[in-house]
Image (cartoon, helix red, strand yellow):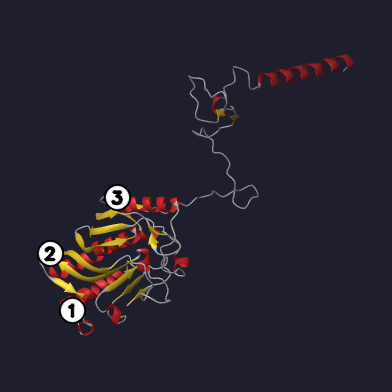
Amino acid sequence: MSIRLTFILVLSFVLAGTGLAQSARDDEPDIQRDKLKFRLGGPQNNNQPFKTPETAVSVVVANPLNLPYVPLPRYKPGTPSYQPPTRVAAPPQLVESDQRGQVSIVLDRMARERDQTAARELRPTLKTSWSTAQITTAAKRCDLVLATTNIDAKRLDPIGGAGGCGIAAPVLVSSFGAVKVNPPAKLNCNLALATYKWLTDKAQPVARNKYKSAIVSIQQYSSYTCRSRRGAGTSRISEHAFGNALDVASFTLANGKKISILKNWSTAGLIFGLGKDATFLNDVHKGACESFATVLGPRYNKAHANHFHMDMGRGGRYKICK
């Protein structure tokens, strides 16, 4: 074979290969590759061209399985670029509602008027004052308590200050729902809420169960008073000096029956399970221990033979139930 003939044959093979490569290009109209093209963002409609926002980037990828979407690769835990999702816990809600839509305040989440740890070192004095911010904050808290309960109370002017006796936003409570208070009690709103919950949720069910009658009034011996624990001397300041304590002496029922702590409390009756009035007072006392930080009664000492002392304590740091 001559050199000229060999050159012609080689040239023919080269030209033929170029034509095949040209015919196999993706942009030839006679090649059907719709099933192998897919734009990120959604399936295509063969009749309507796929449109994307001006800011979107159109990316064509292989989609041999005809998936309605192309799953994006995810980072695997343990790789340097993996960042676990950050979950921010929702703050606890101060106000909650039950299945019936009744709104109530979570007492344990209520802030206090003063720092309770520092308050125990104070001395009875009215020569200090509250700041405007302290009064405003306490007043808003009282507004919330009165709006979500059935407490009948009169708002009073601030008493004393943060450096001694006093209440930033005092209220004079004449009734806790259907239970009247004789005489009206001067309290801070945290204690007013705790007493309301105790009477409504604890004491009333006991009265209805034992006597088939509801409590309509309580007699109180002491609410706010600027004094030390023992009334005088150098003892620590009393919770009464902050409007943070209430002394209850008796309960009166709708049927006219009066149950007095002085007359009807019986430790012996409790031991042997005798006396409906004694068991009623014991159950009410026990219910108070679930609502207050300190509950003192006749079992504690002779000074409490005629009343239950109940207070909110210093931020719930201690629990006394006697």
Q: Residue at x 40, y 58 (%)?
A: 109
Name the residue that disc number 3 marks. Answer: 147
Element marked by disc 3: helix
Comparing marks 2 and 1, which lies closer to the viewer? Answer: 1
Q: Position of residue 147 (x, y in %)?
A: 29, 50
Residue located 55% across and 28% down the image: 39
Q: Are marks 2 and 1 in contact (CB under 8 Å)?
A: no
Q: Is residue 276 left or right of residue 126?
A: left
Can you see residue 136? Answer: yes
Q: Mark 1 or mark 2, which is nearer the start of the sequence? A: 2
Q: CA separation, marks 2 and 3?
A: 26 Å
Amino acid, disc 1: Lys
- Outermost residue on the left side: it is 255
Residue pointed to by mark 1: 263
Q: Position of residue 216 (x, y in %)?
A: 16, 63
Q: Secondary structure at mark 2?
A: loop
**Disc with the residue nearer the chain's start (2 vs 3):** 3
Give me the disc on residue 274. Answer: none
Question: Looking at the figure, which quarter contains the N terminus?
Answer: top right
Q: Amino acid at mark 3?
A: Ala
Q: Is residue 307 above or below residue 183?
A: below
Question: Residue 31: x percent and y percent?
Answer: 59, 20
The span from disc 2 to disc 1 (Cα, nearest Å) is 19 Å
Amino acid type at image mark 2 = Ala
Q: Which residue position is annotated with label 2?
A: 254
Instruction: Identify which residue, 283 or 113, lies in the foreground.
Output: 113
CA–CA distance in space, label 3 to label 1: 37 Å
> At x 35% / y 65%, what residue is drawn?
244
Q: Earlier in the sequence, mark 3 or mark 1?
A: 3
Q: Nearer the viewer, residue 191 or 14?
A: 191
